[in-house]
Each structure stands twice: as C-alpha cells, then as structure tokens.
C-alpha cells in the first residue's frame, strides 16, 4: 500500500463527494438576478486622424467596447496621451 494515497477509495471520501453532487441538483430560479459577468464583451482600439470643420487634422485614438449581452457598444475618442477628447 502506498501511504500517500491509501485513503483515495475511503468511504468518507465518497460520502463527501456524493453530498457535494447532491447540492447542485436543486432547480433555482435565477431569472430575478442580473448577470454577474459579461462573458462576451470585447474592446478594439486604433489610431485615427480626425478632421474638424475647419480642415484641421488631429491625431486621436478610437476605442470601441462592445457589450455583447446588450447588443450595443460604446465608442470613445481619446487624445494620443489617453485623455478623453470628447
């Protein structure tokens, strides 16, 4: 017998595992709760050059964050140093 794993098949171990498995068999209505995590949101950023009404070009960074659960996105425009432009 190996002293390190001699209790792998012990009855108490099986009982604990069975109790843990039975805890997950309850049907709980989660419809009253919001999502804890948005699993499928993503962000994409790129450098861009904006042209104003008076034809002045400004470097900027565009960042799009997509909220997949809401099927909507947020577009942000930043200055090259990362501060918000608009």
Image (cartoon, rainbow, N blue to C red):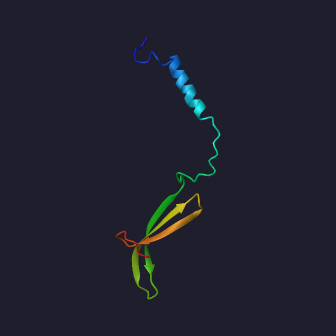
Name the residue rendered at 41%, 81% in the picture: 57
**Label tally:** 0
Name the residue rendered at 50%, 58% in the picture: 42
Seen in the image, is 34 located left or right of residue 64? right
Seen in the image, is 23 located left or right of residue 78? right
Q: Position of residue 34 (x, y in %)?
A: 57, 54
In the image, 51 versus 7, the foreground residue is 7
In the image, 80 versus 33, the foreground residue is 33
Q: Single out the residue that lies furthest toward the left.
A: 81
In the image, 14 versus 38, the foreground residue is 14
Seen in the image, is 21 located left or right of residue 76? right
Name the residue rendered at 45%, 84% in the picture: 52
Q: Position of residue 76 (x, y in %)?
A: 46, 70
Q: Single out the residue that lies furthest toward the top.
A: 1
Residue 54 sits above or below residue 1 on the image: below
Q: Position of residue 69 (x, y in %)?
A: 58, 57
Seen in the image, is 37 located left or right of residue 84? right
Q: Position of residue 2 (x, y in %)?
A: 42, 14
Instruction: Name the image quarter holding the N terminus.
Output: top left
């Amino acid at each position: 017998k190996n002293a390190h794993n001699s209790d792998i098949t012990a009855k108490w171990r099986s009982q604990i595992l069975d109790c843990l498995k039975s805890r997950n068999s309850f049907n709980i209505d989660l419809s009253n709760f919001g999502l804890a995590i948005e699993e499928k949101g993503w962000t994409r950023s790129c450098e861009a050059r904006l042209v104003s009404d008076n034809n002045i070009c400004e470097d900027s960074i565009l960042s799009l964050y997509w909220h997949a659960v809401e099927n909507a996105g947020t577009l942000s425009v930043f200055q090259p140093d990362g501060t918000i432009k608009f």
